[in-house]
């Protein structure tokens, strides 16, 4: 037993030590949690992705279990004072049930919406989708994964017929002769992953990074293309143009394994490298070197992350890189391919089991009649009673409290007041709701606006499964019970269903829910039917699809065929287009956003961990010294960043590592320092992904 090196939870008794995974990102590093007299300690654990390594967030993750600010009782907004006050579970659940009934009676079933998260276990994501469709019977459910990897998911789906972030194990990175990272900064976002890149370079491989900043990752690269934000698609097309003119494309592979190349060949014909240089600022020589390094490598891998994907043209941008990978014959070739670095802890599983507006478990489409019939059978309801598709996250949030939109919202595992684009507007939409319910273990900025807050269990207090960035299904194991007064998300869903006197409540027991999920996913793209908790325990996780108990799982996809009906991958001709908002005299700077090592997402969790707060205490605005000089700003001085949608304020951080026409800020803080006050809410027409990575701003002294 490698994954479960320590005993798993035994009923009725709290183990003193448990083998589990980090609560944060999609790397899902293996760790051991040990109960000590003075709290819980994190110990390293050998696991295939992190090989004993953890980042600072992982090491300090247990600090929140006994945090003084932890929520241990429901909170209800007092109508007379407007304040949140402790209340009993009965009072809180009653308030929710009355509120939901009232809203649905007055405005119809779709007037209630559910918002989930990619940090929820598979069991919870599944139960949430079922709760929305069967108990509430609303079409309105979506989740924060829409803000995360939805563009890569859509591009992967249309090219390969399936969306699994990495279609190969992470360890393949260590053996790549050429590795191209587009808009990814794993040195800060997945530090233990860097071990594979070190191994890659030690074996003589080449690392190439495309990023507007000289990040910690870019510093380790052999070649860094410091492109202007929003120009990756032009770069991708130019790389394919070079591959074509220099005779590098794999004609045999294109003929036997793909369809649609002719149209792509026509599109990229006009993408002379000089044209891409003019847009992106990447020298032609660097573009040529990149194309050659990819084309001449025995094993080459292209990975995209949020830098390339969080754009109103994110799907097309990813398609541009998928086209390049296909033309070079990479996907399915051993040790080669295209992949997306999924971000959230269960960012992969969270997008498979029905939290998405248009989706049913097993990555099925909600408008597919056969899929509806199958899932309705598992749920024991007539198929025609299942609602149809809802709308993507931003559209949903932006409609809240309006005449057309839902009037009640239940949030599980997201903090959109900090993390949504154009957050000032979303905040006011949330305030317009008749009923906002937030389930969290800390008072996030979104919870602080709620009418009812329900305290929930943390990762070390529950069992379940997570699916990491490789599509590997893992076991999360409980070390201890939740504190008195705290219920798990699954219990809350079950309790609500009971009170609402609605069918479809489902079980509060994660293992029972997983067994149902297996049946619901059977035959779907993300087929978990052959995955049992025991099977996961017996190995280092199990890769989906895995349809049969006694059949193999799927660490590597596409070796013989793609998941399309005819088995061929699809090219998609894609054209560069400008960002939704371009710079102008009033807003002359490009603004982009991202992450720092010591903070996680909207910061609810990591801003409360002492060591992380010390490492990254405040937001900042990263400016090139030349730009700072033009603005008359010195290092550490507060600056105001202003866009057409709003403004925020944070100290300037001068750094020659950023382009002088571009400004960067992390999005982990709320209030005055909220970067999302200025971001653009333009969305990708296919994926619904907002344009977090580029808008036009001006920077001024406050
Ligand atoms: N420390 C930490 N780690 C995390 C998280 C966290 O919040 N904190 N979150 C997790 C999650 S959910 C996710 S999604 C991942 C995200 O992981 P990453 O995608 O690695 O993170 P980001 O910092 O959002 O963006 C990566 C890089 O994109 C660059 N960039 C900005 N605009 C562009 C552009 O137009 N083109 C290109 N090519 N690059 C651009 C930024 O400069 C940044 O360095 O991280 C996961 N890990
Ligand atoms: N400007 C800008 N904005 C961005 C991004 C960017 O790059 N730039 N990135 C986007 C991306 S990739 C992402 S993923 C989003 C993430 O942003 P959010 O969706 O806000 O994600 P988190 O901050 O992880 O919020 C999770 C919340 O749920 C709680 N929580 C954690 N686990 C559980 C659980 O199991 N159950 C319940 N009930 N609650 C739980 C946490 O305490 C926290 O308050 O931000 C997006 N916003
Ligand atoms: S890299 Fe991700 S999973 Fe690993 S310890 Fe850090 S936050 Fe946790
Ligand atoms: Mo994400």
Image (cartoon, grey):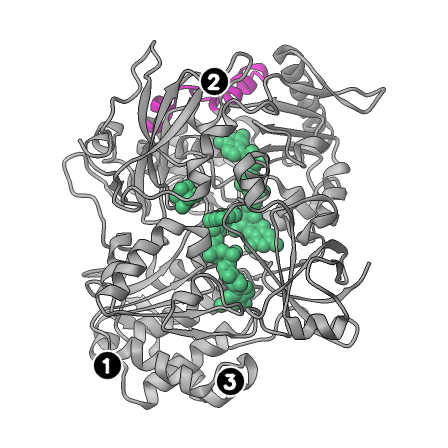
Mark pair 3, 1: CA separation: 27 Å
Q: Quadrant of the C terminus?
A: bottom right
Q: Quadrant of ligand 3?
A: top left
Q: Can I make out residue 167 in this image?
A: yes
Q: Position of residue 65 (x, y in %)?
A: 49, 25
In this view of the protein, which residue sits in the foreground, 626 or 265?
626
Q: Quadrant of the N terminus?
A: top left
Residue at mark 1 = 251
Of tags 3 and 1, which is closer to the observer? 3
How far, Cα to Cα, is label 3 from label 2? 56 Å
The stretch in magenta equals 490-514
Q: Quadrant of residue 695?
A: bottom right
Under circle 2, the secondary element is loop
Instruction: State the image quarter where residue 553 is shown.
Output: top left
Task: Provide the residue designation for mark 3.
Answer: 277
Residue at the spot x=40%, y=55% of the render?
A: 341
Q: How many tags in the picture?
A: 3
Query: Is residue 567 in sight in this rendering?
Result: no
Q: How far across and how far down the image is residue 144, in percent? A: 54, 45
SS at badge 1: helix
Q: CA distance from mark 1 to mark 2?
A: 58 Å
Residue 142 vs residue 86: left or right?
left
**Residue at the spot 60% in from the left edge and 47% down from the top edge:** 668
Q: Which residue is mark 2?
A: 482
């Amino acid at each position: 037993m490698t994954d479960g090196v320590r005993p798993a939870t035994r009923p009725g008794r709290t183990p003193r030590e448990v083998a589990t995974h980090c609560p944060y990102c999609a790397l899902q590093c293996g760790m051991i949690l040990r109960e000590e007299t003075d709290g819980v300690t994190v110990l390293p654990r050998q696991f295939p992705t992190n090989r004993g390594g953890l980042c600072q967030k992982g090491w300090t993750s247990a600090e929140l279990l006994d945090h003084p600010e932890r929520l241990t009782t429901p909170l209800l907004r007092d109508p007379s004072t407007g304040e949140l006050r402790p209340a009993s579970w009965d009072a809180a659940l009653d308030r929710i049930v009355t509120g939901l009934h009232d809203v649905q009676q007055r405005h119809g079933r779709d007037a209630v919406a559910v918002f989930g998260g990619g940090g929820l276990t598979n069991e919870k994501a599944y139960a949430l989708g079922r709760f929305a469709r069967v108990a509430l019977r609303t079409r309105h459910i979506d989740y924060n994964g829409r803000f995360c990897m939805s563009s890569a998911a859509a591009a992967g789906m249309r090219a390969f017929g399936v969306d699994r972030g990495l279609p190969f194990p992470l360890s393949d990175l260590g053996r790549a002769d050429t590795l191209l990272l587009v808009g990814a900064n794993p040195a800060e976002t997945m530090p233990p992953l860097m071990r594979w890149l070190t191994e890659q370079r030690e074996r003589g491989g080449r690392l190439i990074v495309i990023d507007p900043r000289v990040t910690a990752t870019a510093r380790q690269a052999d070649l860094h293309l410091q492109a202007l934000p929003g120009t990756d698609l032009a770069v991708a097309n130019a790389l394919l143009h070079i591959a074509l003119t220099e005779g590098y494309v794999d004609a045999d592979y294109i003929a036997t394994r793909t369809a649609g190349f002719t149209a792509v060949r026509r599109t990229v014909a006009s993408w002379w490298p000089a044209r891409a240089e003019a847009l992106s600022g990447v020298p032609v020589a660097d573009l040529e070197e990149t194309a050659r390094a990819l084309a001449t490598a025995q094993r080459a891998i292209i990975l995209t992350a949020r830098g390339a994907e969080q754009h109103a043209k994110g799907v097309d941008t990813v398609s541009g890189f998928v086209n390049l990978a296909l033309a070079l014959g990479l996907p399915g070739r051993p040790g080669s391919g295209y992949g997306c670095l999924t971000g959230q802890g269960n960012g992969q599983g969270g997008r498979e089991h029905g939290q998405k507006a248009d989706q049913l478990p097993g990555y099925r489409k909600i408008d597919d009649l056969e899929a509806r019939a199958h899932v309705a059978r598992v749920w024991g309801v007539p198929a025609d009673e299942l609602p149809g598709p809802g709308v993507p996250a931003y559209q949903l949030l932006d409609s809240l409290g309006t005449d057309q939109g839902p009037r009640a919202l239940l949030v599980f595992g997201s903090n959109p007041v900090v993390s949504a684009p154009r957050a000032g507007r979303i905040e006011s939409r949330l305030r317009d709701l008749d009923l906002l319910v937030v389930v969290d273990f800390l008072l996030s900025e979104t919870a602080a606006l709620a009418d009812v807050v329900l305290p929930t269990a943390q990762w070390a207090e529950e069992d379940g499964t997570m699916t990491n960035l490789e599509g590997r299904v893992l076991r999360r194991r409980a070390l201890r019970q939740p504190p008195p007064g705290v219920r798990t998300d699954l219990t809350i869903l079950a309790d609500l269903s009971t009170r609402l006197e609605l069918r479809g409540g489902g079980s509060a027991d994660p293992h029972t829910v997983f067994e149902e999920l297996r049946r619901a996913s059977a035959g779907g793209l993300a087929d978990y039917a052959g995955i049992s908790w025991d099977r996961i325990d017996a190995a280092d996780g199990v890769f989906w699809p895995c349809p049969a108990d006694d059949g193999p799982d799927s660490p590597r996809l596409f070796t013989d065929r793609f998941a399309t009906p005819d088995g061929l991958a699809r090219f998609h001709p894609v054209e560069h287009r400008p960002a939704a908002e371009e710079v102008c005299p009033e807003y002359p700077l490009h603004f982009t956003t991202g992450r720092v090592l010591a903070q996680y997402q909207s910061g609810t969790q990591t801003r409360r961990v002492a060591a992380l707060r010390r490492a990254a205490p405040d937001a900042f605005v990263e400016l090139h010294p030349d730009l700072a000089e033009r603005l008359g700003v010195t290092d550490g001085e507060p600056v105001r960043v202003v866009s057409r949608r709003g403004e925020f304020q944070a100290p300037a951080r001068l750094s020659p590592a950023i382009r002088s026409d571009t400004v960067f800020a992390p999005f982990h803080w709320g209030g005055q320092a909220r970067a999302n006050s200025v971001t653009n809410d333009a969305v990708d027409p296919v994926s619904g992904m907002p344009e977090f990575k580029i808008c036009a701003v001006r920077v001024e002294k406050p």
